[in-house]
Amino acid sequence: MAAAPAYAATPLAGAVLVSNTTADTAFGIPAHAVLLLTAGASGTKVTEIDLTPGGTIATGGVVVNIYLYNGTTYYLAPNGSVLVPAVTPAAQVPAPTIQNSYDNLVLPSGWSLYVTETVATQPVFVTVFGASL
C-alpha cells in the first residue's frame, strides 16, 4: 500500500476525428483503429470520453468502439461500444454529444486508447479527458 495517495499531476485531453474509409465491424482485433490517447509514464486516469457526429454530410447511425491496447492486445473498453445517432447537419441544430463518464478507468504506463467506427466515412469527433498520475 502506498504511503501517500496518488493525485492527478497533469490534466490530459486528446481528440480525433474518426472517419475511416473502411469500417471495422468486428469486436476482435481492429484493422483501422485510430489512436486517441497514450498513458503517461505513471499511468493515466480517464474520466470522460465524448462522441459527437461531425462533418458536413448527413450521417446515419454509427457505432464507435473504444479499445484499450497494451502494446500487444486490444480489449474493448468498459462501455466501449457506443451508438452515435443519425444526424442531418443544420446551422440551427447542434450535434448531440454522447458522454461516457468513468470513475475507475486507469491506464497503466504503456497502454493506449484507440477508437474505430462500424460505418465507413461517417465522421465522429472523439474527445477524451483525464489526467496523468
Image (tube, grey):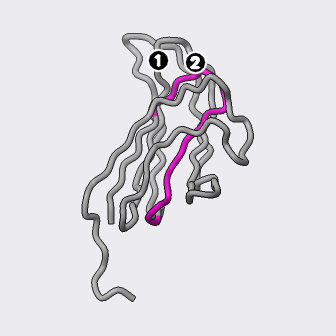
Foreground of the two, 36 or 95 = 36
- Does the magenta run of residues contain 115? yes
Q: Which mark is residue 117?
A: none
Residue at which label 1 appears: 55
Q: Which residue is mark 2?
A: 59
Q: Is residue 13 above or below residue 2?
A: above
Query: Given this view, does label 2 or label 1 mark the residue nearer the observer?
Result: 1
Is 119 in the magenta? Answer: yes
Mark 1 element type:
loop
Q: Are marks 2 and 1 in contact (CB under 8 Å)?
A: yes
Q: Which quadrant holds the C terminus?
A: bottom left
Residue stretch in magenta: 108-125
Image spot of residue 45 (x, y percent): 39, 61
Give how far apart the Cα atoms at labels 2 and 1 are: 8 Å
Looking at the image, which residue is at 74% across and 41% down? 26
Q: Quadrant of residue 44?
A: bottom left
* Tag 2: amino acid: Thr
Circle 2 crowding by C-alpha within 10 Å: few under 14, some 14–19, many from 20: many
The amino acid on which the numbered mark 1 sits, given as a three-letter code, is: Gly
